[in-house]
């Protein structure tokens, strides 16, 4: 707005100069100064667990205790303000160069305090001990853990808002939503294959209310554990055989489970997914397990795996 004012003023001066010295310029009414946009800080926002969090000023020193939050910060152009991350924050690559403050739950409180953050992004995993301990030390903590893709977009928008990157966040969210909409348009009328999402060889899976259950549905699949009584149930082989999934997703591939190990399991040769060669080795589970900007990559990958005929 100020640049525009200067340009307009310059044009007026040029026009006046071109009128000749003998002419008396008309009386000019002074233009009012361009108003300066008011800072949105301080602001109070509600986090994922219902805490009312007051952000006093635009954060300049941010610590992320969650890999997905780290990815969000970098996607918003806030990498230089990140002063600490966890050992699991491996994306983008430059995040690995930041000081480490521990793992998921074993956060080093002294390191966190020593880095003098004005904002810490945490998850519900940290609610029992870490969050109260930081709050006692006067450190602002925002807990964010969305349980759906839609809430992930809301979370990104909120993180953008509390860090002074509201416009960047809205642009990112709009781009993500466009990719989500494109997937939805392709699978709109397609039949939904039944999906078994394996989290471990002990047959733990994703149930109702979990982030992964929402992701499976959004990718055009039908979760065979959708009616389980918990978000992270353990199924029996009998239940899996009875459900006879069309697709098996090995989210435990990085822990040694492969198509060949599945084929060698007693009774698994009866499954439709095994017989038709639709056992998917998830080589990069970060894109489906982290609630952050790359979740759209995970959605696109799964939609193509569930509906290969629609994406060729």
Image (cartoon, rainbow, N blue to C red):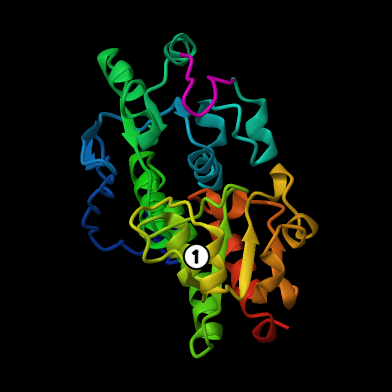
Instruction: Name the residue: 76% across, 54% down.
Output: 261
Quadrant in the picture for residue 40: top left
Q: Where does residue 4 sit, x and y in percent of width and height?
A: 41, 57
Residue 208 versus residue 155 in the image, above or below: below
Q: Is residue 203 left or right of residue 49?
A: right
Name the one closer to the observer, 183 or 35: 183
User: Residue most toward the right?
Assistant: 260
- In this orientation, does residue 79 appear? yes
Please say whether residue 105 is one of the residues in the magenta stretch. yes
User: Residue most toward the bottom?
Assistant: 189
- In this orientation, does residue 2 appear? no
Q: Where does residue 208 sit, x and y in percent of width and height?
A: 37, 60
Residue 266 versus residue 123 in the image, above or below: below
Quadrant in the picture for residue 174: bottom left
Instruction: Name the residue: 46% across, 71% down.
Output: 217
* SS state under label 1: helix
Q: Main secondary structure of the magenta part?
A: loop
Q: Where does residue 177 sit, x and y in percent of width and height?
A: 46, 68
Query: How many C-alpha atoms fall within 10 Å of the one at disc 1: few (<14), some, or many (≥20)?
Result: few
> Where the N terminus falls, by quadrant?
bottom left
Query: Magenta segment range?
Result: 100-108
> Where the C terminus falls, by quadrant?
bottom right
Residue named by callout 1: 239
Q: Is residue 265 left or right of residue 143?
A: right
Please say whether residue 84 is one of the residues in the magenta stretch. no
Instruction: Name the residue: 41% across, 20% down.
Output: 117
Q: Where does residue 46 sit, x and y in percent of width and height?
A: 23, 42
Name the one closer to the observer, 209 or 275: 275
Residue 132 versus residue 17 in the image, above or below: above
């Amino acid at each position: 707005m100020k640049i525009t004012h200067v340009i307009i003023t310059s044009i007026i001066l040029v026009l006046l100069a071109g009128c000749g010295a003998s002419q008396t310029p008309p009386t000019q009414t002074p233009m009012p100064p361009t108003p300066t946009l008011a800072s949105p800080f301080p602001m109070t926002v509600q986090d994922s667990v219902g805490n009312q969090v007051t952000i006093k000023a635009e954060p300049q020193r941010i610590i992320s205790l969650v890999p997905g939050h780290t990815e969000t910060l970098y996607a918003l152009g806030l990498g230089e303000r990140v002063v600490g991350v966890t050992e699991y924050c491996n994306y983008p690559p430059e995040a690995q160069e930041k000081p480490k403050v521990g793992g998921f739950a074993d956060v080093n409180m002294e390191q966190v305090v020593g880095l003098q953050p004005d904002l810490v992004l945490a998850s519900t995993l940290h609610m029992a001990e870490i969050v109260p301990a930081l709050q006692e030390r006067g450190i602002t903590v925002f807990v964010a853990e969305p349980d759906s893709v839609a809430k992930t977009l809301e979370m990104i928008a909120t993180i953008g808002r509390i860090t002074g990157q509201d416009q960047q966040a809205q642009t990112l969210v709009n781009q993500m939503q466009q990719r989500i909409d494109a997937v939805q348009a392709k699978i709109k009328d397609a039949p939904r294959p039944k999906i078994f999402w394996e989290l471990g060889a002990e047959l733990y899976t994703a149930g109702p209310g979990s982030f992964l259950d929402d992701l499976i549905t959004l990718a055009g699949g039908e979760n065979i554990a959708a009616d389980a009584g918990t978000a992270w149930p353990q199924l029996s082989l009998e239940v899996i055989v009875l459900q006879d999934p069309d697709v098996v997703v090995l989210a435990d591939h990085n822990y040694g489970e492969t198509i060949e190990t599945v084929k060698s399991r007693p009774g698994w040769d009866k499954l439709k997914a095994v017989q038709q060669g639709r056992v998917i080795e998830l080589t990069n589970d970060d894109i489906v397990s982290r609630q952050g900007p790359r979740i759209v990559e995970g959605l696109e990958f799964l939609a193509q795996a569930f509906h290969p005929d629609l994406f060729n």
